[in-house]
Amino acid sequence: MKYDHILVRYGELTLKTKNRKMFVNAIRKTMIRTLEGFDVKVKANRDRAYIELFDADPYEVMDALKHVTGILSVSPVVKMDRTEDAMKETALNFAGGFKGGSTFKIEVKRADKEFHLKTFDIQDMLGGLLLRNTENIEVDVRNPDYKVMVEVRLDGIYMYHDVIKCVGGLPAGTGGKALLMLSGGIDSPVAGFEIMKKGVELEAIHFHSPPYTSLQATEKVKRLVDIMSERTGVDIKLHIVPFTELQTTLYDKIPDNMSMTSTRRIMLRIAEKLAWKVDAEAIVNGENLGQVASQTLTSMHAINAVTNYPVLRPLLTLEKNDIVRMAKEYDTYETSIMPFEDCCTIFKPKAPKTKPALDKVLKFESNVDFESMIEKALENIEVYETDAKESENAFDALL
Ligand code: ATP
Ligand code: MG
């Protein structure tokens, strides 16, 4: 079957009538960005978009659009002249690909109400034709295996039957900006994707402690933002914060069973300062209730006490195996499980408190001048910027 267009259906856009134009423009921009390098033309209308395929493979194009937020589903489509012969020929071609013993239905949409054939005429003509010419298929109007859609428009007739689900959500850049706390683990990139799905643009912050953390660990985080950026067609700025001085001071000055809480508190303080600076309206992390000692409700309470900023935790109540499935879907899993720790094992407390007492944490922290170290860390941030199309980085060379 030679497809010449991809039909793109929008996600939750329908709800937002007032902002529709802005949403359509945003989604058009991201699609153009994502499909750079494909021989295609993007035509985004009010209610849907068509990608005209010149010399591009329809399945590669659909794969590239799968994670563009705001796209609900895509279909490979054949566009034809507005003649009966053209419709018949294409419908027969489709039916040739149906499995034996299957059922089908012809569904017609007449966007052009003046078209000389009525809905029923088209259904009757094509349904009868397929039944007469294709062996071992039947009509089932309720629950068909194949739904052949025929759309009659002014510029031609569009026919398709395959519908491929995409990520959905809202178009990039329509929901403000948030700062993602990105470790090299499985959870935080998934948390980032979930927030991006809602049209929120991200910057990311990563804390590293060289030489205790390896170069590979930092390159791995760069690769994670590359993947996120490539899949969604949206660039992400990654801020890499030098954390060694703070990390070693925490190790020396805070009792072992409270150092995890204080470490997270300091990270959050730095994240908040950066969020103000880059105009991010929320902080996002990959925390999951009860997963580890630092993620009990009591720990979260003690950690969160350093900020008034909204801290979004999209994975809060999910099961780990669902998060893993999502990481695989978003293509970050293989990178996340690479064995480069973002925080050297020597700093990991042996028995972190699951119920840290905030008053004690505050007392120990008050003995140390963390503020000046925090300022210094912020001054020495290294910035890595993705380019949604140029995602090569030094990571492979380091393996
Ligand atoms: P992840 O898989 O995202 O690392 P996790 O379950 O391993 O999550 P923790 O390592 O305890 O949990 O971290 C909880 C959250 O804190 C992470 O999801 C991430 O948002 C943030 N975080 C942890 N370490 C770092 C780091 N080095 N840099 C930036 N953010 C971090
Ligand atoms: Mg982790």
Image (cartoon, helix red, strand yellow):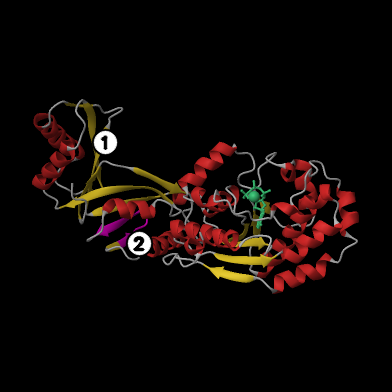
The label nearer to you, 2 versus 1, is: 2
Magenta region = 42-53
Is residue 86 found inside the magenta-colored segment of the image? Answer: no
Q: Quadrant of residue 40?
A: bottom left
Q: Which residue is mark 2?
A: 35
Q: Amino acid at mark 1?
A: Lys
Q: Which SS does the magenta portion mostly show?
A: strand
Q: Residue at x 69, y 60 (%)?
A: 212
| Side of 268 where 119 appears, left or right | left
Q: Pick whichever, 249 or 346, lies toward us.
A: 346
Looking at the rendered structure, which numbered label has been put on residue 53? none
Is mark 2 in CB contact (under 8 Å) with mark 1?
Answer: no
Q: Residue at x 42, y 62 (%)?
A: 30
| Side of 117 where 352 appears, left or right | right
Q: Quadrant of residue 42?
A: bottom left
Under circle 1, the secondary element is strand
User: For the residue carrying disc 1, how many other residues have a C-alpha within 10 Å: few (<14), some (14-19), or many (20+)?
Assistant: some
Q: Amino acid at mark 2?
A: Leu
| Side of 48 where 381 appears, left or right | right
- Name the spot of residue 32 as percent of width and height, x first: 37, 64
Indicate yes or no: mark 2 CB to ligand 1 under 8 Å. no
Q: Residue at x 57, y 48 (%)?
A: 186
Q: CA distance from mark 2 to mark 1?
A: 28 Å
- Name the spot of residue 104 as percent of width and height, x first: 23, 31
393, above or below 315, in the image? below
Residue 380 in view: yes
Is residue 47 found inside the magenta-colored segment of the image? Answer: yes
Q: Which residue is mark 1?
A: 147
Q: Residue at x 82, y 47 (%)?
A: 257
Q: Pick whichever, 22 or 285, lies toward us.
A: 285
Counting residues from the start of the chain, the first of labels 2 and 1 encountered is 2
User: For the residue carrying disc 2, how many other residues have a C-alpha within 10 Å: few (<14), some (14-19), or many (20+)?
Assistant: many
